[in-house]
Image: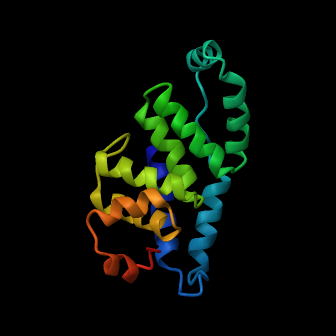
Amino acid sequence: MIIIVLIIIAVVGYVLYSKNKNGKNTNSQTAKAQSNAEKKETFISFTDVEKQQLSKLGKLDPVMVAYKKAINGDAKAMMFLGLVYKQEFNNPKKSFYWVEKSAQRGNSEAEYLLGTYYGRGYGVEQKKAMANMWIIMSAKKGNKDAIAFLSKTMTKQEMRDLEIPV
């Protein structure tokens, strides 16, 4: 499972870096590989114990609705599940799993949160370069939390150079 996630991360990273300024993919084989990886994608599910906990909290129904949306590609639902695993179960690995899936689909909130996970090593090995990449991607989309975070260590001109709206 970890190998599949790492392969998907590598493919997505390569696709992101192989796009030209017009946003068109310059490597069609990479796009096909990413598409094939997404077709084979499987999703983690809630255990019976987790479902019981959610039921006791009165949250089972909305979480199961979100789960159905998430497995159909809804990035906001994936982000929601990541937060459920963080806040309700204190499960860093499962939280990372869902937040990463949401970020890979372009959710700027998830990109920022994923960057913080990499920065702290929450649910994943700490990697500052990955943290910076995800936070910058989020900031470029105008995410206020990401911009505020970067403004602590970067000048406005440095942020403008990276095409971050300040």
Task: Give the camera-side residue of 162 and 24.
Answer: 162
| Rendered view: 121 above or below 158 | above
- Residue at image point 56% right, 73% down: 30
* Snapshot quadrant of residue 146: bottom left
Q: Quadrant of residue 37?
A: bottom right
Tally of numbered tags: 0
Q: Would residue 68 be visible to someone looking at this image?
A: yes
Residue drawn where x is 41% and y is 67% of the image: 136
Residue 60 horizontal side relative to residue 148, left or right: right
Q: Is residue 159 above or below residue 66?
A: below
Residue at 38% in and 60% down: 148
Q: Residue at x 45, y 55 (%)?
A: 112
Residue 6 appears in the figure: no
Q: Quadrant of residue 162?
A: bottom left
Q: Is residue 111 left or right of residue 60?
A: left
Q: Is residue 15 above or below residue 91?
A: below
Q: Position of residue 84 (x, y in %)?
A: 54, 32
Q: Position of residue 14 (x, y in %)?
A: 47, 71
Outermost residue, bottom side: 21
Task: Assign the C terminus to one quadrant of the image.
Answer: bottom left
In the image shown, does 130 or 30 lie closer to the viewer?
A: 130
Up the image or down, 28 lies above or below 118; here it is: below
Choose between 144 and 129: the one closer to the eye. 144
